[in-house]
Amino acid sequence: KNEVEQSPQNLTAQEGEFITINCSYSVGISALHWLQQHPGGGIVSLFMLSSGKKKHGRLIATINIQEKHSSLHITASHPRDSAVYICAVDRGSTLGRLYFGRGTQLTVWP
Amino acid sequence: DVKVTQSSRYLVKRTGEKVFLECVQDMDHENMFWYRQDPGLGLRLIYFSYDVKMKEKGDIPEGYSVSREKKERFSLILESASTNQTSMYLCATDPRGNDSPLHFGNGTRLTVT
């Protein structure tokens, strides 16, 4: 069983819709990362969270440590948001390795 | 801005060849990682390094080795390439410590024929 589970695996939305991607994990963590991967491969770090909520533009990430759950929200979605969104957790070792979810493929249609 | 550079974007090699994938970072980060990414499996850790000449096996090290002779460079070596090593390979770094996001290279898509 993967220690990090994402849902949904695939998500299709119409431009302008509010989008939520969920991440649940089963281990203790020191931080959780949300990453974005566009076609072609490059991965960009969107957020790193250890508690509460962070916002950057139309993206909002929240984490509930007690429930071992995080959500990534996209408001007013746009076709350029189409990408794979990946959740990863840091279990707090000094070596810094992360454990990854399998990703959510988001497609936003105009 | 942190820059993580992978030497090749696309690579085609023959079965049995020795393959070198290079990763160079320009921000003096201690930790460097090699992942492979396959459809439906997500990112899987092959090897990581937390200092020069130090290395640790990840989840799928078989068939791979690594070298870190200088802090900025982390090389992944496929000793004898096989078709099941056809994949996207991604290098990543982080500076170790709290509030340290991960930085990825653009990836190398390796095809072994």
Image (cartoon, coloured by chain):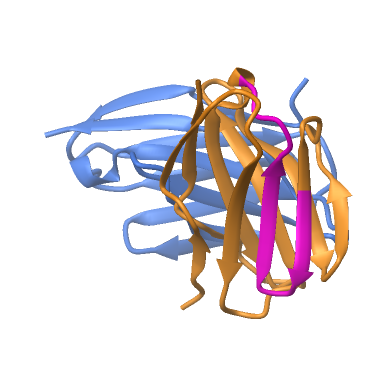
Chain colours: A blue, B orange
Magenta stretch containing residue B100, yes or no?
Answer: no
How many numbered circles does the render carry? 0
**Residue A70 picture location, percent across and down:** 61, 43
Task: Judge by depth and name the residue closer to the eye, A68 or B35.
Answer: B35
**Residue B112 picture location, percent across and down:** 53, 25
- The residue at 32%/56% (across/down) is A58
Q: Quadrant of residue A69?
A: top right
Majority secondary structure of magenta residues: strand
Q: Is residue A75 rendered to the left or right of residue A66?
A: left
Location of residue B33 with respect to A54 vertically, above or below? above
Q: Is residue B42 rendered to the left or right of residue B76?
A: left
- The residue at 39%/54% (across/down) is A59
Q: Quadrant of residue A27?
A: top right
Q: Is residue A30 visible?
A: no
Q: Is residue A6 visible?
A: yes
Q: Quadrant of residue A6?
A: top right
Quarter that holds the C terminus of chain A: top left
Task: Judge by depth and name the residue closer to the eye, B32 or B69.
Answer: B69
Location of residue B47 with respect to B103 vertically, above or below? above
Range covered by the magenta-colored residues: B66-82
Q: Is residue A11 rendered to the left or right of residue B53?
A: left
- The residue at 83%/70% (across/down) is B51
